[in-house]
Every structure is written in C-alpha cells, then in structure tokens.
Amino acid sequence: MTSANVERRLDCNIAIVGGGSAGALLAARLSEDPARRVLLIEAGAEAADPDIWNPAAWPLLQGRDYDWDYRTEPQAGTAGRVHRWARGRLVGGSSCLHAMGYMRGHPSDYQAWADTTGDSRWSWEGLLPVFQAIEDHPLGGDGIHGKEGPLPVYLPADEVSPVARAFIEAGASLGLPRLQGHNNGEMIGVTPNSLNIRDGRRVTVADAWLTPAVRSRPNLTILTQARVRRLKLDGNQVCSLEIVGRQGLVEAFADQVVLCAGALESPALLMRSGIGPQGKLDAAGVGCVIDMPGVGRNLQDHLLGAGNFYAARKPVPPSRLQHSESMAYMRAGTFAANGQPEIVVGCGIAPIVSECFQAPAAGTAYSLLFGITHPTSRGSIGISGAEIGDRLIIDPAYLQTGRDRELFRQALEAARAVGHRDELADWRERELLPGTLNSVAEIDDFVAQSVITHHHPCGTCRMGKDADAVVDSDLRLKALDNLFIVDASIMPSLTSGPIHAAVLAIAETFARTVAYDMV
C-alpha cells in the first residue's frame, strides 16, 4: 500500500491484533508503561447489548451481529453435520459470549506444555503466580487462589438449582469427591461451576482490564471495527499492518506485532500474509513468502454430547445462574480414581440438545451433557482466498480416532449412571434420550448426532521446541523476529475443562515476559 492510497498512518511500539480476552488483557498490561505506545485493533465494536451482562441470557447471544458465527466443513464423525462456531466479534471477544465458567485445568495438562516447550514457565507451578494475579477468588490468599486480581471468580451457593444439587449428590454417591471449585489442582469430583460473575452480572475481560482509567491512557489507542488484511514483511520482520474498516485504509507501523485474534483468525492472517503451508497458500491464490507447514494444523476442540435427556416429574425452576451449573470430571470407567480427567458429565438445567433432536419446553426437562477432556483427533484451519471476506475452511476432524469414540461411549455410560441414581429420582420422570441402544454402532450413531461444540478451539499455531512448532516458548513466531502470537492458537493441547482461564494465563505470562525482554 503506497502513501497515495493510505488515508491514515499509525505509529506505535506494539500493535495488538484482536481485542478479545488475550488482546484486551495485553492492551491494559502493556500500556502500563507510559513510554510504550500500544495500538489495539479489534474487528468488532464495543459491547453494548445489555443481554451480554445477564448470565442467564448467554445461550441467546449466539448468532447476533457480534458473533463471528463460523461454520465448519461437514464432519464425517458427526453424521455429516456442519457445526456453528460462535466466537465474539467485539471488544472483550468471546468473554462476552461464553458460559462464564472459570476452570484452570489439571496440573498434568500444563506438564504437557512444559514438556513440549522445554520451559517450566508453562508448568502448573510456573503458571500458579500468573493465575493468582488474574483472579479475585473468595478463597484468595490461601496460597493457591488469587486475591484482588482484575477478574472475579464466583463460587455459587444458594443460587444453585435443586436439579444441579441432586446431580452433585448423585455423583458423590457413586464415589466422586466433593470439591470446592475446579481451580486448586484437583479436577475429578463434583462441585458447582466457578463463574466470572459479580453481583449477578457477567464480568467480561474488557470489564475487568479495560477500565475507564486504562482507556484514558494517552499511550493506548483502541481501533474498533477494523480488520488487518495482511502483514507486510521486510526480511525477517513485520514492517507494517494493512488495516481496513470504517476508518478507511490504515497502515500501522509497529516495532512489535502481537496476534491475539484467536485459533481461527490468527493463522488465517498469517496465511493471507503468505506465511503458512505452501500447498494451502497456492490453493488459495496467495504467494508463499515463508513456508511454515504447522500454521493452521493441530486444531482441537472439546465436544459435548447433548445429551442424555430426561423428562422432569415436576417443573424445573429456571436457572438463577447460567443453565450449565455443574461439571463433574472423572476417569473413564470409574468414579473412584484420581488424577487427570478423561471424561466429563455436566448438568444442564435447561433442555439442551443438538439440532438433530427436538427440545421440549423449558421447565419440562433437563440434560446431562457428556464429553471427553483430551481428544486425540486433530483438524485444521485454512483460507479459501486472499481477502478478509473469503471463507475460512474449518475442519476440526471430530471423532476421527478410535480412542475418542471409545471414550465418548464411556462418557455416555457415566452420564446415564449418574442420571439414573436415586438422588435424582424426585426430578426424573423418564429418560428421553438416548433410549435403548443395542450395539456399539448404535451408541456411536447417537453420539455422532448429539455432540455439539464446547466452544474451545485451539492449537493452530502451537508452541514447542520441535521443528514443526509455529512459535517458541516465548511465543515468538519462529520465522520472524518481531511477531508474537498470544492466544488459544499457541496451546499444544487442550486443558481438561474450558480454556478461558488458560488463555488469560497465556496473555499474563507474555505480559510479564515483555516487561523484562522487550523494553
């Protein structure tokens, strides 16, 4: 882009692409130094819909104009279905749309990251002070949980649905330990979900970190409704970013560029800029500048079977929280073992089913959701063309391994074991789904029709010390000196539960690295 057709030029020390969870946190943290000029570029607008802050309204937010509302390729492992992937297109990103669950994960999840990178910063022990800095937890100050951090972590008590209470009692009767939240390093057991709620309202990452005081900093610029078309390279550096939006054409020059656009848009931007697998770039009509086969690979996502479904004996009161009130993690085939979870069963107060099944009226039924924590299936993200309006090719390769299918069978079996316990008898009239299943093939067919995304895409620009990894342990793109990726795409593997806490920890870790290494 020449000076003749550039309407605006922006200069900064650090340009952050994507104002979602990681980007919003980083913009606040990196602009703490008044000598550092920070530019935050977000494709969407500021959050304005009042439903965003109503915890019970979160399922209704999907499909609104601030949802990217992606579509996957048809999935052979899920009966040929196309899955809709909701992702936040606004300041605060998917923290404005998600179910508000806050779960760090299990220590073994992070040991895998430390082993892959050879860097102990990514271990549970290395990340513990980072998590603590993020959190304002009611147990904060105990050496495990954080206190007076920007993000509230709420432990529900009186508001917990009587159905969820009965679900928890049923799990405990089978041998699952009782936990006080999911964030002390123990995941296996029963507990109400920890939530990012304060005074009955959702707290987004933008609420927590981009406060009025932060937004008023003269060294922080937030550019909304703007997308980075491509990165312009000069040798082994990004020299500028080509931006389009309501501001017209903008070229931004930055000393350092940080991609926080997420597991889909970060690799897509790299590929539009000529960085990625040469074959995929050739197919999309993009000249390959840097051949990096790992860009866009290793796509992972959690699935939940929706579900093991029950007609209620009496009216189910509406959730006073956010419908999905309790997740019980466990090993497959047993309720007694400890360690890293393999499967999960969740209690949905609302009737939650996939689009393959008919949901009855709210208050007449409830769902037990079931899933696996560490799927071995690996998919990919690609681009269909060189422009930002060209469709992304999203292939999560759901349920492509025999291990994933076997664990899903065991997860369904665990859900039904919980669902038929006496502790739920006062609520259970009869099981509606799946009904009688007479063979492995029938079980697999039901799973294929029932699974829905848990909204945890990650892994497409994974970190590691091996040659195929996209970024190193400092999150620097291996092929360039001044480009970093800080979002869910760098995760080598999924954590045991929702990944939002891990994404925030990634961003906070990088902010601390910047404080020492990039000034």
Image (cartoon, grey):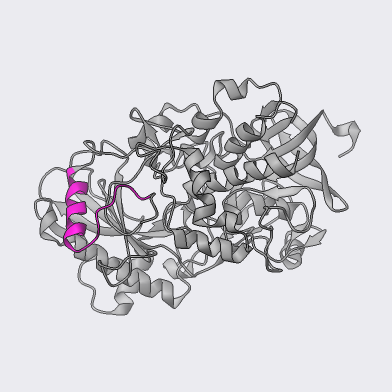
Q: Where is residue 293 in the image (x, y as percent from the top left)?
A: 71, 66
Residue 352, above or below 206? below
State the image coordinates of residue 455 (x, y, percent, origin top left): 46, 51
User: Which residue is painted at 23% across and 38% down in the image?
Assistant: 318
Residue 406 placement: quadrant: bottom left
| Residue 288 in view of the camera | no
Residue occupying the point 25% across, 46% down: 349
Q: In this view, does 176 lie to the left or right of 101?
A: left
- Left or right: residue 138 versus residue 105 is left
Magenta region = 162-182
Is residue 22 found inside the magenta-colored segment of the image? no
Foreground residue among 472 and 69: 472
Residue 243 visible from this viewpoint: yes
Q: In the rendering, at what x and y percent does residue 122 appear?
A: 57, 56
Q: In this view, does 134 lie above or below 347?
A: above
Q: Is residue 364 above or below residue 307?
A: above
Percent of width and height locating residue 435? 20, 67
Q: Quadrant of residue 299?
A: bottom right
Q: Is residue 252 left or right of residue 310?
A: right
Residue drawn at x 80%, y 60% is: 290
Q: Is residue 176 magenta?
A: yes
* Number of numbered labels in the structure image: 0
Which quadrant of the rendered structure holds the N terminus? top right
Quadrant, the C terminus: top right
Q: Which of the two residues, 359 or 407, is positioned nearer the viewer here?
A: 407
